[in-house]
Structure formats: structure tokens, C-alpha cells
Image (spheres, rainbow, N blue to C red):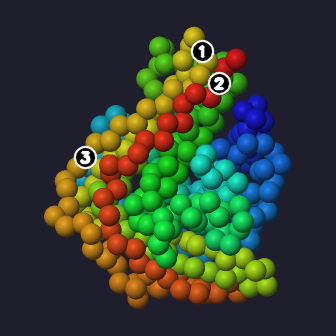
Amino acid sequence: MKSILFILVAIVATLPLKAQWDPFDPILVNVADVQMAEKFLEKCEVVRFRDLFPEPQPVPDFSCYNDSSCTTWGPWKKDTAIVSHPLHPDCPIYIGYLHRNCTTDQSFVQHHITSMTYRENDPDCTSLNIWLLNGGSAPDPDRLNQLYHDLYALLAKEMFIEFNNLSMYGWNDTLYCDAYTHFKVSYVKGTCMGWCNGYYRHNDTGVYSVTGYPKYCDADACCKVTNAFCIDRKTGKLKHSEDVEYGPQPTKCEVEPITENECYEMHHDSEYSTLEQVRVLKCKPSCDINFLDLGGDVIVE
């Protein structure tokens, strides 16, 4: 599968830049094969309607966002991805995100997920639904925060694979652990996070979906998470580590991040879909989250 992804990435890299951003030109993350890729694209086509994904909100101006590892960052760019989570591999999760590269060292990247959507009544997403509900009637915010954390790591791994592919086939080089500073992808999130979720019925399709927007509960309380990747020269396997740097801590955490009316304002009907309801999920601690180790894949034979 890695060779298939590398070929796809190489083809995409040669395409001209689009004059206008198309929300449904997604990167496929952790997708096992071409057949699954086609299936995921077809499923997400139903829920990808442009007007459900408004212009991404600006990246929060957290005090701990500054990254001394880079002197000059490039501009933020918009993109979308379809992600297969290793614990729920058949359920495509569609995300909108921003990313930027360090202009002085391309091995440093920052990314920021703005929204995530999945088909709630898809049988292939039953395991994800059960896990998120955790025995309740609404998603467990602790588990939503864990899923959000995992999506960042999965997206970071795909960025590494693409960069290493460019390095191997474009520059005849490989990002071995003993030769280079690790490829690092970082993001900053609120130390305390809540959620604004919208539940949609997509007209004439029978599809129901959930779109979640993360909400930060204290503008001064944050942590920076860095995923680092490299390749072990002896085994050819991917090595993955994670580092969490804590900024100021919130004075109070478990509160409502926004009002229900404010959450409604973030969602709306469209020609293709009807908003059934919204749910505001309470803020919960979001920095002490389980590490999803994505190492072990053989990258170099």
C-alpha cells in the first residue's frame, strides 16, 4: 500500500495549483488500498457539501504557539483529508484543517484541525459511535478529545510519508534517525476543550452525519503537541514520538464553551441537507491524552 500512496503523492505533486480552493480534494490518511480509497471518497461525497464547511476560523492566538525551532513560517493553507482511524478502520472521518511549513527548514510543520465529520448512520461507523457515546446518549467529550488528538497524529504521519517520499524520489535522500533532525509536526490546542456538534440529515440520501467543531475554553490556557518521525536505518521502520509542552493552566475547566444559540450559528441548512439539532459538550481537560504510537511500518525495504 505504501507504494500506491507514494505514486499517488508523486502524481499530486506534479499537478498545477488550483485557482480556487476545492473543499473536496482530500488527502487520504491511513487508507489501506485503492478499493478502500474509492469507497471512502464515495461515502464522504454525500457529506462534503461546500456550504457545510464555511471559511475556517483563524488559528487561535495562543501564547504557547510560538515555535523557536523556526525563524520564519509560511502562510496558512486550507486543506481537507479523509482519515481511517486504526481502531475504526472502515469509518471514513472527513476533516478540514490548516497547515503551514517553516520556510527556513521544511522538516518543521504546524497544522490546525478546524472541523471533523462522519456519517452517523453508516454501519461501518457503528464501532466509532459506540466508543464515542461511552454508554451515554451524547458523545463523551473526553473521547472526542482523544479522537481529535489521534487525528492530528495520523495527519502528521501522512505529512511525514509525503515529505519522505519527496526526499527519496526527488532528492535521492531518506530521513534516517541517525542522520537528520526528526520531521516534526506540531499543533497547539486549549488545555481545556469543549465541542459544538451539528447533526444533519442529508436530503434524499438517508444519510445522517455529525459535524464537530472544537471549542477552546480559555484563551490563555494551552499546550503544544509535537509529533516527530524518522526512519530506523537498520530496520527501515518508522519511529514515532510525541512531546507535550504545557502553557498556562485554566482557572476553571468543566464549563460550557459556548451557548446553544452560538452553536446553532455555526451550523445551517443547505440545499442538500437539514440541520436536525446541535449539542454543546462541556469542556474537559485535553492535554493529558493517550499517545497513539504510529511507528512500526516498514518504510524502506
197 to the left or right of 281 = right
Which residue does the image show at 63% across and 53% down from the upper left?
A: 88
**2 and 1 marks in contact (CB < 8 Å):** yes
Q: Farthest residue toward the front?
A: 135
Q: Which residue is mark 3?
A: 246
Question: Which structural element holds mark 1?
Answer: loop
Mark 1 Cα within 10 Å, few/some/many (few <14, many 20+)?
Answer: few
Q: Earlier in the sequence, mark 2 or mark 1?
A: 1
Q: Quadrant of the N terminus?
A: top right
Q: Earlier in the sequence, mark 3 or mark 2?
A: 3
Residue 144 x/y as whole percent: 46, 62
Q: Amino acid at mark 1?
A: Thr
**3 and 2 marks in contact (CB < 8 Å):** no
Q: Which residue is mark 2?
A: 298
Which residue does the image show at 39% across and 61% down from the upper left?
A: 142
Front of the two marks 3 and 2? 2
Residue 278 x/y as whole percent: 49, 82
Residue 200 x/y as whole percent: 62, 81
Q: Amino acid at mark 2?
A: Val
Asked whether 181 or 203 is in front, the reply is 203
Q: Is 261 above or below relative to 36? A: below
Q: Amino acid at mark 3?
A: Tyr
Q: Which residue is mark 1?
A: 235
Q: Quote the CA–CA distance across marks 2 and 1.
A: 8 Å
Residue 282, picture quadrant: bottom left
Q: Earlier in the sequence, mark 1 or mark 3?
A: 1
Residue 236, picture quadrant: top right
